[in-house]
Amino acid sequence: MPSIASLKIGQRAIIKDFSVDDIPLKLLEMGCLPGNEVTLIQEAPFKDPLYLTINGSHLAIRKEMACKIEIEFIDG
């Protein structure tokens, strides 16, 4: 299953699944929940961290964390 870490810049997806134990509460509070849309805006040098828009919130997460959040790509 693809994860947020597999997104290309400008690509959109829907968050499908993750282990609640692996995701910090702050990410959940900022809208990182199943069913919400995520878009990769920018990658830092060496591709870590990733700058995302999730449900209208802008945030940066480490690639290690992004690998734990499964997504489904949005066509178009």
Image (spheres, rainbow, N blue to C red):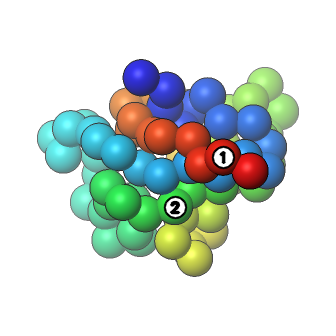
Q: Which residue is mark 1?
A: 75
Which residue is rendered at x = 57% and y = 41% of the image?
A: 73
Q: Looking at the image, is mark 2 or mark 1 earlier in the sequence?
A: 2
Q: Quadrant of the N terminus?
A: top left
Give the left or right position of residue 69, taking residue 9 as reference: left
Q: Residue at 79%, 43% (x, y): give it.
A: 9
The image position of residue 2, as x and y in percent, is 49, 26
Image vertical order of residue 36 relative to residue 72, above or below: below
Q: Nearer the viewer, residue 68 or 76?
A: 76
Residue 64 visible in the displayed image: no
Disc 2 and disc 1: Cα gap in Å?
12 Å
37 or 24: which is nearer to us?
Answer: 37
Give the amino acid type for the residue marked by disc 1 in the picture.
Answer: Asp
Three-letter residue code for mark 2: Glu
Dot label at residue 37: 2
14 displayed left or right of 41: left
Q: Which mark is residue 5?
A: none
